[in-house]
């Protein structure tokens, strides 16, 4: 949002009148207020706006600001007020915020919460990060089996304020086991005296508290769900995950996978907000691993020192052949890794994908062999150009096929294919490229 | 979904009783039925299920199947029936389906539609692919200003069936200009006689028909919207885009960006469904471009033939230095490209990011210089090890900084930074790596 649109807020803050600030803030979404606060956090304008907002709005805005800013905004808040603020937050935002605090402050805060909020918080804290349990909200609407549509609407009307969504409600039995889901759409359209059990959606989709958050996001996207119910080990309803959280997960997972493809590991945030140290840490690991991996390529070259010394012209084409092997491998690996991430590719597809790649990489290799052969004729003798062309077919094929198989193998072994595939494959393709090239050259030119 | 879960469907189809199939299908979501049909399309079981489903369910299932399967399922459908089927589809699915058909069939079909559907389809067809206009649905709920909450709920009750969502409704004036958005949540909670104008959401978020679909998805994700209203050039409400479409866009854009990072361009689908020819086409372009780019690296090596001939030990470390430059560049470029895609990085950040990278890449370079120096001491003379270590600092710094600047430059020039950055940067880093290495070696060892 352009900063000029925030002028009413800036003016109101400058006027020094609390009422004017509250009125100006009414014009904006929580997401916009959070953006303004983040942008103006250093100049204190942001904090001063935050402190002047009504409690409920502050709780909402906090859910839209990034973790560091959440801490800055609340570090000076007295404990009693912080307890009121966290009580106002949706249960999923609350547990995330709570996790940011230092342990002594956590202990003080939890004692100030009322029993219900405290139990809720403790239950949510028990789930491992990255699971459905850690993502879910406990602010869902439930009905007992047997009530009518109009009774259900009445319940929603009275309890709407505390619910994450009232568009999906959950029908449970006495043991809190989930029977089904009913949408507000069906409740509204139904005859007022229709029993809700007759209005349940078909094909109930649920997940478990320990399901990974990307599987959760994928379920929500696949079935176009507004909210996904999360069950505990006894099939009791433990919480719900709403579409907006799924969207954030999809975006964050994509960022993580893109980073991994560029050999950047474990970076929670983007380059703008990440500290130099966390950038260093996320990058050094693969760089050093790849140094060692590339020593093999160097050793490969050293092994062929004699033929290289005798035909230095071979060196001219080495980067091109090695890079082509690496590029072809990176391409097929990228396709397979993304396919695994979206659920499009599963391990048992390996033979089909291998055969497809055999066909595609052969075509790619032939095209590129022709290209380098033509280039070679201008730069060197016929025999070297021919060696280069033959090598090109072989290395593109080798790179492409390794690119298909390695991610599937890693996946099979339980290693995240996104984390290792691209840099590893490039390096393996490099080594293979050198070996194939000079082996073919030696065979044709003699030692 | 495991295929065993589809057993009721398989049994019903085997029984040959139409009624049994319809009853079995009632147990499943449209998304699951679509999955079953896709998996069993070749064996005809899929088509036979599809043809036995009631019209409304068929229309819904069609929206969940991929384009090729949509064509397979409907190729034998008589025109009159196809018209009924498309009339049942949500307007956004309908236009996508229509775009799949051959022109003669399009013309025949459009003549069979009733006037309202025809006008709607024609209007939606006018928007360019990848824009909000092409993504939006026209099945939204509108109210005139001044009605009460209970009147509004009554209208929704009667018209719900034809609406994409009834959870967000739009209040428009006589010129169809959008005044505001009201949620069903507020309508339900409000006093029945409250005027809807008093229930409008604050901070109205809208978009234009020509906005790109990724900007649309980003708006929906940022504001946690259920639906985003799309306005035409006169600020009249033209359609809405719902969160589920935004989720698909985020996923598809991430796939595209990941593919581009692996130098795979313009591939609409994943490796499983893409044809060998479209895979070839999406990969050959960058492979050939990179062959020519790598000729420069080769030329760089050829230029330093003398010093290489004199000190073949230098070759041993070449792959490692060149790869490190490329890897460091790929890392910083990946971070910047993703930052640009998520809106986290904008062009004016360049100096700040440059300085940050200066600091991070120096630290990375020093760490790696130490590593290769230690390795070098075991493998070669002290002087070569020292040359390699100095080169390492220089190439990591060069690679890292190019990786920051090139994507921003491309973005500035209006070229998609995701499409070109990674392969280009790896190649530029390769060339620079060779030049820096042998220049330093020449300076220290003499020619």
Image (cartoon, coloured by chain):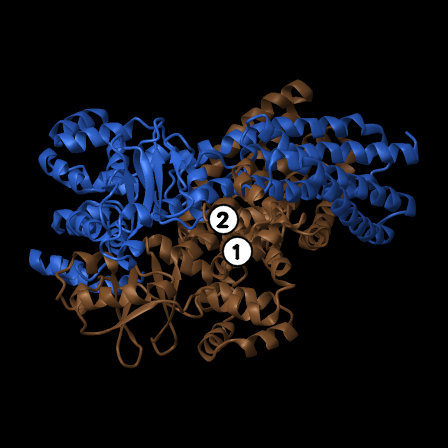
Chain colours: A brown, B blue
Q: Residue at x 66, y 45 (%)?
A: A431
Give the left or right position of residue A265, taking residue A412 as reference: right
Point 56% across, 46% down: residue = A36
Left or right of A81: which side holds A297? right
The kind of secondary structure element at disc 1 is loop
Q: Foreground: A413 or B67?
A: B67
Q: Quadrant of the C terminus of chain A?
A: top right
Q: Quadrant of residue B305?
A: top right
- B238, B143: nearer the viewer: B143
Q: Disc 2 on helix, strand or loop? A: helix
Disc 2 crowd rating (10 Å Cα; few below 14, some 14-19, many 20+) is many
Q: Earlier in the sequence, mark 2 or mark 1?
A: 2
Query: Of residues B237 and B58, which is closer to you in this image?
Result: B237
Tell me the subunit letter for badge 2: A
Coordinates of residue A375 in the picture (x, y in percent)? 62, 22
Rendered location of residue B165, percent (x, y): 27, 48
Q: Residue furthest top?
A: A378
- Which circle marks residue A53 in the picture? 1
Q: Pointers 2 and 1 in contact (CB under 8 A)?
A: yes
Badge 1 local density, few (<14 within 10 Å), some, or many (20+)?
some
Q: Residue A2: x, y in percent?
A: 54, 36
Task: Identify which residue is drawn at 15% across, 69% down.
Answer: A195
Question: In the drawing, what numbered circle is on residue A362?
Answer: none
């Amino acid at each position: 949002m352009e900063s000029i649109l925030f002028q009413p807020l800036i003016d109101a803050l400058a006027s020094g009148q609390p009422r004017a600030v509250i009125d100006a803030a009414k014009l904006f979404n929580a997401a916009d207020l959070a953006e303004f606060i983040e942008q103006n956090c250093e100049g204190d304008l942001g904090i001063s706006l935050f402190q002047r907002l009504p409690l409920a709005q502050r709780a909402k805005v906090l859910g839209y600001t990034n973790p560091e800013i959440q801490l800055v905004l609340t570090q000076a808040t007295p404990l009693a007020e912080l307890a009121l603020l966290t009580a106002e937050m949706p249960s999923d935002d609350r547990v995330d915020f709570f996790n940011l605090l230092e342990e002594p402050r956590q202990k003080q805060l939890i004692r100030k919460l009322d029993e219900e909020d405290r139990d809720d918080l403790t239950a949510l804290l028990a789930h491992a990060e990255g699971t459905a349990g850690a993502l879910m909200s406990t602010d869902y609407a439930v009905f007992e089996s047997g009530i009518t549509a109009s009774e259900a609407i009445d319940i929603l009307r009275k309890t709407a304020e505390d619910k994450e969504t009232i568009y999906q409600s959950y029908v449970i039995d006495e043991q809190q086991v989930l029977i089904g889901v009913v949408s507000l759409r069906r409740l509204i359209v139904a005859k007022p005296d229709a029993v809700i059990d007759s209005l349940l959606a078909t094909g109930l989709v649920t997940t478990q508290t320990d399901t990974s958050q990307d599987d959760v996001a994928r379920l929500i996207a696949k079935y176009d769900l507004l909210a996904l119910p999360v069950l505990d080990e006894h099939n009791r309803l433990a919480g719900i995950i709403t579409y907006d959280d799924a969207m954030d997960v999809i975006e964050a997972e994509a960022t993580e996978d893109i980073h991994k493809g560029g050999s950047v590991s474990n970076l929670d945030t983007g380059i703008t907000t990440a500290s130099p140290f966390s950038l260093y840490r996320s990058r050094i690991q693969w760089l050093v691993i790849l140094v060692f991996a590339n020593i093999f390529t160097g050793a490969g070259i050293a092994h062929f020192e004699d033929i290289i010394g005798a035909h230095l012209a071979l060196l001219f084409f080495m980067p091109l052949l090695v890079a082509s092997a690496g590029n072809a491998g990176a391409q097929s690996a990228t396709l397979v890794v993304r396919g695994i991430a979206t659920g499009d590719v599963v391990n048992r597809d390996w033979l089909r994908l291998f055969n497809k790649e055999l066909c595609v990489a052969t075509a790619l290799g032939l095209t590129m062999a022709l290209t380098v052969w033509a280039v070679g004729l201008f730069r060197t003798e016929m025999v070297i150009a021919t060696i280069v062309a033959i090598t090109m077919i072989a290395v593109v094929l080798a790179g492409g096929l390794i690119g298909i198989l390695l991610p599937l193998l890693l996946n099979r072994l339980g290693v995240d294919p996104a984390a290792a595939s691209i840099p590893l494959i490039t390096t393996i393709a490099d080594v293979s490229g050198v070996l194939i090239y000079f082996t073919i050259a030696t065979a044709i030119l003699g030692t």
